[in-house]
Image (cartoon, rainbow, N blue to C red):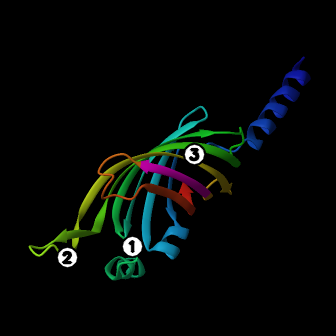
Amino acid sequence: MYKSFLLFLICFSAAAQDQPAMKHHEIRTNVLGTISQGNYNLSIEKQTAGSFSYGLGGSITQSSSQKAAYETGNKSNLPVWDITPFVRYKLSKSLRSYYFAEAFSSLNHGKYKDIIRNTDADNNAVYIVEKGKYTSLALGGSLGYKFVIKQVFVLEFLVGFGSNLLDTKKSPDVVSRVGLSIGYQF
């Protein structure tokens, strides 16, 4: 009896050591967005005991190429910042690597410009450029893959899109959520 109990404890402790300890918090940044768009992003995520997690992300866009495209007329919108709360659901049970589905909302703000055609007193067409700011709220969904390295470092790939619901004449129609992020779990 004693030997059976001792064997059970050894097997149980070995099985418990094989399971990685679940870290409940994660902070990460989108490297792809920073390199390609000058978009500086920081996100924090909290894991729950089940398959859900939730978090909050924010970004600021400081791209000289996007500003130049906006000023020369190639773009009618210039995003400045956004705040993005999200909820995720794991599509697999692994703690080390898994696919996930995400629902998000995005409070986004930026600049816009529009070319307006007016007529003068002689009925000639006069075009003016109207500039202003927009603030909108988008809802959307994403799919992604997360890989945890040594139970601490995170590599994440995410693709998703949402649609702005407010101020639609000034704000962009589609808000994208695309990224290759690195992070740290604690």
Choose between 20 and 177: the one closer to the eye: 177
Q: Is residue 185 magenta?
A: no
Q: Give the residue type at disc 3.
A: Lys
Q: Which of the 4 image quarters holds residue 147? A: bottom right
Q: Earlier in the sequence, mark 2 or mark 3?
A: 3
Query: Which residue is farthest front?
Result: 122
Choose between 170 and 156: the one closer to the eye: 170
Q: Give the residue type at disc 1.
A: Lys
Q: Which of the 4 image quarters holds residue 59? A: bottom left
Residue 56 lies, with reference to residue 93, above or below; the image says below
Label 2 belongs to which residue?
126
Q: Mark 3 falls on what kind of element?
A: loop
> Which quarter of the image is occupied by the N terminus?
top right
Q: Is residue 161 magenta?
A: yes
Residue 58 lies, with reference to residue 138, above or below; the image says below
Say which mark, if any, is on residue 75: 1
Label 3 belongs to which residue?
23
* Mark 3 surroundings within 10 Å by alpha-carbon count, few (fewer than 14), some (14 through 19), many (20 or more): some
Which residues make up the magenta segment?
A: 157-163
**Could you tell me residue 46's position as x and y percent?**
49, 43
Who's the residue at 28% across and 68% down the image? 114
